[in-house]
Image: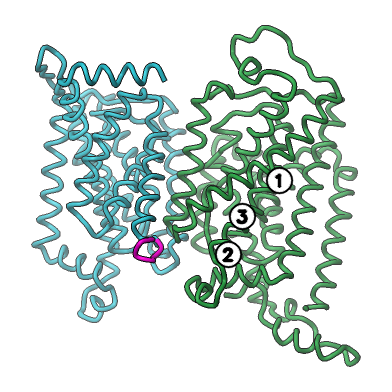
Amino acid sequence: MKRIERGRQSIALLALFAAGLAAPLLLSDYTNELALLWLMILFAVTWDILGGQMGYNSLGNIFFFGAGMYISAIVQIGLFYDVGMYTSGARTTHISFSDLQYFSGLALGMLAAGIGSAILAAAAGWALFGLRGPYFAIGTLGLAIAAAELVASWEWVGAASGISMPVFPGNPELQKLFFYMLFFALGFALLLFLNWLYSTRFRLALNAVRDDEEKAEAMGLHTRRIKRTALIVAAFFLGIAGAIFGNMTGFIEPRDIAFPTTTFNIYMVLMVLLGGKGTFWGPVVGATVFHIIKEATWTYFLGWQYVTLGLLIVIIVVYFQQGIVGWMIESYPHWFAPKPASEESDAYAKASIDLAARPEGSP
Amino acid sequence: MQHIIANISVLLAAPILNVGLLLDGLMIGAIFALAAYGLALVWGVMNVKNLAQGDFIMIGGYLAWCLDQRGLHPMWAVPLAFLLLWVIGWCLYKSVIRNVISRDLFTSLLATFGIAIVIQQGLNLAFGPNTQSAQADLPTWSFAGGLITVTGTRLFGLALALVLSAVVIVFMKSTRMGQAIRATAQDARAARVLGINTERVYAFTFCLNAAICGAVGALVAMVWNIQPFMGTTYSIRLFVIVTAAGFGNLPGVIAAGFGMGVFEQFGGFILGAQFQQALVVLLLLIVLAVRQIQQLSLRQALQ
């Protein structure tokens, strides 16, 4: 279905792939910033699966990010050393990882982070998806804060003083490029995966849950299973992203790096609202624009950056909620409607275009 | 684990300590109940979930602390904070809240969260991140050989909380504005048809809630301590209380407030003070789970 639109989509994805590959070569001074940009895109796109497509506004997605970060740290260290000894403040012996140990640990850690977060998501989904609307938002926020507080008092993983991650073997330039490539690969894999997933019935089921959950259930959809699957997909990618981010910063800590409920956690929501909820490209556009604005504010309004952030939240939420892509769809609907089929196309394409004439993301 | 068991056995060995903790819990719970009532009021009347509630409390607290620093008695902060927060509440209502009432619930949640961040960071820039408290210099009484202490400030807090809630309840029951607020909560459209200016009712309700929070904050600064980022914990506490009680249920809110105070005192004593925030959040998750199971048996979702 939507053959022509999908052709356009593929071209856009290819262009993004080329841009992602070329960016660190063209802007080699900003490799770290670009890596963070891909992290922001990952945040926004995974949030949009639930918040935009499914209509469940979560304030606790950061839980899976932090969980992945800690799972990968435990795997990477625990494979070769005793974790309690490694994290204890009284440690005197110098610990180093060989190249092989580092990379095998990192690969296994990322895998374990993804799978572990997905398992946690299945459990959390079981507990949380009886909640709707604001209760769901508050419940997920509570989950994230509780995780931060519990990890902060858990001695075995270093409690509030955190864990120093294994050091990357190689020069800093190589390190930056390496982590950029990891984030880029993960982010692009997520976009490709969702590009496929959203072309299946699953997207329609997600939208049905958003539009009217009772009716969706009455039509025979297993709403609980759909909601849990969506959360597991988001958590899998967030967990891996957490593992990469933990290794990139080199030091992890519960309150400000792993489970930052007032920074990354809110950026996710904000980027999606800024870009346009429930559209494929909205979160990507929102993340890019937000990241640029944020870096500029952090540079020019240092000290006032969080006040500016709060004001930005209020302004976006109150006055500009349809987002950039949503606004474009409203103002220039003909850009987004599929072009009329050419004469030689078959009847099936025509019929599917009628079905697809509704602009993306309209309720 | 060891110190938890040790603390429990202390409580079992000296039952009089339980009485002390219970009294403390009730005195603190009265303050929670008052602020939770404000939250329930805004929630019920305008369907706005105010996540900046705890930060309003912190503004009131910092006003009390400032008066204390200038040599004035911090008790003056109670009426002053009431007035100050009334004005702040009015400004916020006119600029932000008015635009989110008719929108979906998540919008109001996120908008008030934004306000909360601005207030937190503003307080942090103005007063620094240290924990502060205002000294009220009231006498302390000891009973049972020093095992139970009742501080004058806590007693004052309890008394003031009781007076304030009595005033609010009488106001809601017997004045014209109180009647209008209750009518709007029941059915805003019908209230408008009958000639009630709901816009004014909304503004008044939000200002009243902010003002109550300010007075509560002044009490908190005297009874406990304040810090710019503590507001979030208070907001979550109040959400726990209102969620547990159901927002239309005033006696329930008051009872849940007392329960919260008692729970925190015992939890803090048994587990240690560093677990306080974790305890509050865990209680939130437990309350949500229990409410969810209750609703599930009615084949409904919590929404």
Tint of chain A: green
Majority secondary structure of magenta residues = loop
Element carrying mark 3: helix
Q: Earlier in the sequence, mark 2 or mark 1?
A: 1
Residue A39, numbered circle: 1
Location of residue A357 in the rendering, given as x and y in whole percent from the top left corner: 70, 83
Among the two numbered marks 3 and 2 on one chain, the one whose residue lies closer to the N terminus: 3
Task: Using residue B102 as the reference point, say whether residue B184 is left or right of it.
Answer: left
The residue lying at 89 percent from left, 45 percent from top is A26
Residue with the mark numbered 2: A54
Would residue B153 be found to the left or right of residue A94 on screen? left
Q: Residues within 10 Å of mark 1 (few under 14, many from 20)?
A: many
* Mark 2: few/some/many CA within 10 Å (<14, 14-19, 20+): many
Pinpoint the chain carrying mark 1.
A
Look at mark 3 in the image and give the residue it sits on. A47
Q: Observer-nearest residue: B35 or B292?
A: B292
Q: Which mark is residue A187?
A: none
Q: Which residue type does callout 2 highlight?
A: Met
Of discs 2 and 1, which sits in the foreground? Answer: 2
Magenta region = B296-301
Give the vertical position of B242 relative to A332 (above or below).
above
Residue B249 picture location, percent across and down: 22, 57
